[in-house]
Image (cartoon, rainbow, N blue to C red):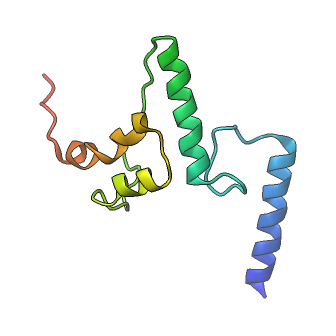
């Protein structure tokens, strides 16, 4: 019975938060109609817009895609027609997380 109440209260809180606009547009987790695919498309558009102005986009991928198979990711990206300029996500992330950083002086 308590699980039912939790679900009802959770749904009401989520609906109230969406209706009042208190959540930032970039908030993706635990929101309806905000999938990983939508998040990737938003980041891709942000990167393209910034590159067209010859700007720099600082992105922090720490912990991103930590459960994704690095070997299979490029194949999935191609199957899903992910733009080529975003394919760097599958390369370098695994090595970047293992790379040692120089000690600060």
- Displayed quadrant of residue 13: bottom right
- Residue 78, image x and y in percent? 42, 51
Describe residue 92's horizontal placement relative to residue 42 as left or right: left
With respect to residue 88, does 10 lie above or below?
A: below
Residue in view at x 86 percent, y 43 percent: 20
Residue 82 in view of the camera: yes
In the rendered image, residue 21, in percent from the top left (x then y), is placed at 81, 40
Quadrant for the C terminus, please. Answer: top left
Can the viewer see residue 61 in this picture?
no
Determine whether 67 is above or below 40 in the image.
Answer: below
In the image: residue 66, left or right of residue 79? left
Q: Is residue 70 above or below residue 91?
A: below
- Residue at 42%, 26% in the rendered image: 58
> Seen from this angle, which residue lies furthest bottom?
1
**Residue at 81 percent of width and 48 percent of height:** 18
Q: Is 34 in front, or is 11? A: 34
Q: Residue furthest top?
A: 53
Left or right of 15 on screen, residue 75: left
Residue 102 versus residue 72 in the image, above or below? above
Residue name at image x 59 percent, y 37 percent: 42
Q: Number of numbered discs present?
A: 0
Quadrant assignment for the N terminus: bottom right
Q: Quadrant of residue 12?
A: bottom right
**Percent from the top left, x then y, of residue 53?**
51, 11
Q: Position of residue 69 (x, y in %)?
A: 32, 62
């Amino acid at each position: 019975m308590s699980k039912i109440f939790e679900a009802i209260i959770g749904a009401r809180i989520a609906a109230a938060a969406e209706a009042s606009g208190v959540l930032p547009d970039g908030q993706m987790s635990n929101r309806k109609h905000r999938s990983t695919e939508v998040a990737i498309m938003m980041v891709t558009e942000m990167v393209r817009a910034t590159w067209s102005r010859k700007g720099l986009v600082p992105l922090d991928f720490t912990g991103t895609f930590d459960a994704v198979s690095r070997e299979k990711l490029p194949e999935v990206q191609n199957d899903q027609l992910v733009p080529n300029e975003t394919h760097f996500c599958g390369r370098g992330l695994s090595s970047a997380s293992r790379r040692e950083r120089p000690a600060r002086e």
